[in-house]
Image (cartoon, rainbow, N blue to C red):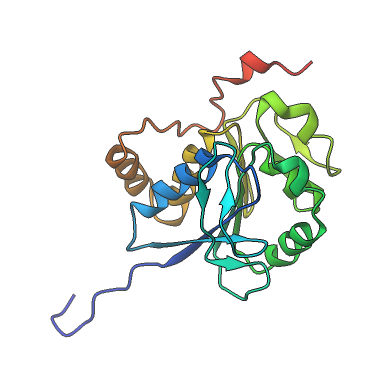
Amino acid sequence: MSENQPEPLAPQFTVTALLYDEFDLLEVAGPLEMFGLLPEYFTIQLVSQHGKPVCSKQGPQLVADYSVYHTFQTDILLVPGGPGAQDAIRNTVLMNWLQQHSSKTDYICSICTGAALLAHVGLLKEKAATTNKKRYRWVTGFGSEINWYPVARWVKDGRIYTSSGISAGIDVSLAIISQLLNEDIARKTAIEAEYIWVNDPTEDPFAPLHIVQ
């Protein structure tokens, strides 16, 4: 590269996590930690129905940057699970927003029972997907024509990623980083976080503990 040529710009992505009452804290904080370790590539933001602080299952609140009534740009949408998914799935405002906003988003990623929300609004139709095996029966009761994987740490089908329970959200976020940037950056990010990345999507060590009959 000559001295007069500018350095190539790093790719930029905006990651948005959807919050609702009683979401699981790690399912938001874990993936956002991975993206947050790469601020030169990723910008992080949070959205909730009313744009107000939302209480997690564990108690602490996270403060949303936007409400669903705002207009904002998103490249990657994260949909966590948690006990509140059972109420969120009956919230027509949130579900309508998720369905409509998905068409404006390059990548959609659910963690744990967040897959139920994607299934409910039709985003997983004719797709392969997985979820938390402990809640497998409940989640797989939503949607139709979905190829559910009873053993998988995460599943990628086109622009949609679904992951297994709780900490699997960290693994799938690193998989997204690997795809958008490269595997070396993803591995270095995991090392920076002192996290052992399960980078094989078929390796699901917890599935045998919650065998689906």
Q: In this orientation, which residue lies closer to the viewer: 168 or 183?
A: 168
Horizontal side of 34 relative to 103 (left or right) equals left
Examine the rendering and report whether any part of residue 27 can be seen.
Answer: yes
Above or below 22: residue 194: above
Percent across and percent down for residue 72 are 57, 74
Residue 144 percent across, percent down from the top left: 86, 43
Q: Which residue appears farthest toward the left when viewing the image?
A: 3
- Give the residue drawn at x 74%, y 58%: 94
Q: Nearer the viewer, residue 131 or 66?
A: 66
Q: Where does the image place residue 115, in percent across and percent down from the top left?
A: 70, 42
Residue at screen point 56% across, 72% down: 73
Does residue 126 appear in this view? no
**Residue 113 horizontal side relative to residue 4, left or right:** right
Q: Residue at x 15, y 79 (%)?
A: 2
Among the 4 quarters of the image, the one containing residue 193 = top left
Q: Quadrant of the C terminus?
A: top right
**115 in relation to 96, above or below:** above
The relative height of residue 119 versus residue 47 in the rendered view (above or below) is: above
Give the camera-side residue of 114 and 65.
65
Q: Position of residue 12 (x, y in %)?
A: 41, 67
Q: Could you tell me which residue is drawn at 66 percent across and 64 percent down?
A: 50
The tally of labels here is 0
Q: Quadrant of residue 104?
A: bottom right
**Which quadrant holds the N terminus?**
bottom left
